[in-house]
């Protein structure tokens, strides 16, 4: 009788982990932590910065499309923030805006802005050479598998993806390359650490739309404009991406 109870409890626990099998739509909320201080050369300024810049994002997905966009902060920006804090907010925003992916057409559209001029960067989903490993871990009751890109610690990206969410969702530029949604990411040995904090079956159809407000531009042309307008931010972006 005792063993039967043990077995029953194990079955319930296992069911709780795999109950989300084959999720085809929903919303994933992520917490992103960015170590801006390691990119600041001035030692005094670096000591003024907090250990992490933390922000939240959401990934909405349905019918092989997705959109990744920032969640509004809990509080408005502090008008009395120190120069170091203002620099942290500016430099940490290395990804421009909402990123829309269509996995049917292999197309990616990214909202961006330079000097108040709005753009929509037209790109294809980039192929990424991942090394798939056998390691597993549980994230939000989902069994996740490990994948690694790069060799050295300073350029290596480690992700954990859930195969029971078969849409190849990625919070950065890795969409379409893995057999599941990325629920955790560690980029460049801690430059950026991103972790899913909640998963909901709800979909806001008003948000899950391709962006239309902005001038269409290729990724190459946009990067050239960024290099002229904001050279410091381009250097930070190259370092962490």
Image (cartoon, rainbow, N blue to C red):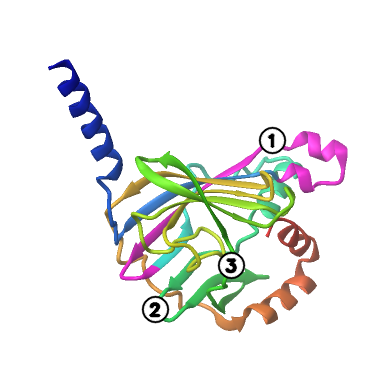
Disc assigned to residue 104:
2
Pointers 3 and 1 in contact (C-beta within 8 Å): no
The residue shown at (72%, 48%) is: 153
* Closer to us: 88 or 40: 40
The residue tagged with tag 3: helix, strand or loop?
loop
Residue 182 coordinates in the image, percent (x, y): 47, 54
- SS state under label 1: loop
Check if residue 155 falls in the magenta segment. no
* Of callouts 3 and 1, the N-terminal one: 1
- Marked residue nearer the N-terminal end (2 or 1): 1
Crowdedness of circle 3 by 10 Å Cα count: few (<14), some, many (20+)? few
Measure how far apart labels 3 and 1 are at the Cα level.
32 Å
User: Tag on residue 50?
Assistant: 1
Give the magenta range.
Answer: 36-65
Residue 116 in view here: no
In the picture, the quarter occupied by the C terminus is bottom right
Residue 11 appears in which quarter of the rendering?
Answer: top left
Other-residue count near label 1 (Cα within 10 Å), few / some / many at <14 / 14–19 / ≥20? some
Residue 220, position as x, y percentages in the image = 68, 80
Q: Where is residue 130 in the image (x, y as percent from the top left)?
A: 57, 61
Q: Nearer the viewer, mark 3 or mark 2?
A: 3
- Seen at 38% across and 40% down, the residue is 140
Residue 85 vs residue 10, the one in the foreground: 10
| Residue 37 on the magenta span | yes
- Circle 2 sits in a helix, a strand or a loop, which is it? loop
In front of the other: label 2 or label 1? 2
Number of the label disc, if any, that sits on residue 76: none
Instruction: Judge depth for marks 3 and 1 and give the one in front.
Output: 3
Q: Measure the C-alpha gap from mark 3 to mark 2.
A: 17 Å
- Residue 128's disc number: 3
């Amino acid at each position: 009788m005792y063993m039967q109870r043990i077995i029953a409890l194990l079955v319930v626990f296992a069911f709780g982990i795999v109950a989300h099998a084959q999720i085809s739509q929903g919303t994933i909320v992520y917490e992103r932590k960015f170590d801006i201080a390691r990119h600041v050369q001035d030692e005094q300024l670096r000591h003024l910065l907090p250990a992490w810049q933390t922000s939240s994002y959401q990934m909405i997905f349905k019918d092989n499309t997705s959109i990744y966009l920032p969640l509004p902060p809990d509080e408005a920006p502090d008008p009395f923030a120190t120069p170091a804090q203002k620099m942290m907010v500016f430099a940490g925003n290395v990804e421009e805006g909402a990123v829309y992916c269509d996995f049917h057409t292999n197309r990616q559209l990214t909202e961006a802005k330079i000097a108040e001029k709005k753009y929509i960067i037209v790109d294809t989903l980039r192929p990424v050479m991942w090394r798939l490993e056998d390691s597993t871990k549980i994230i939000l009751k989902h069994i996740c598998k490990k994948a690694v890109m790069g060799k050295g610690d300073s350029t290596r990206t480690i992700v954990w993806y859930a195969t029971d969410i078969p849409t190849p969702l990625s919070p950065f530029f890795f969409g379409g390359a893995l057999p599941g949604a990325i629920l955790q990411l560690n980029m460049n040995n801690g430059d950026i650490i991103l972790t899913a904090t909640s998963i909901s079956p709800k979909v806001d159809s008003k948000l899950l739309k391709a962006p239309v407000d902005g001038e269409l531009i290729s990724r190459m042309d946009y990067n050239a404009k960024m290099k002229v307008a904001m050279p410091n931010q381009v250097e930070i972006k190259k370092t962490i991406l």
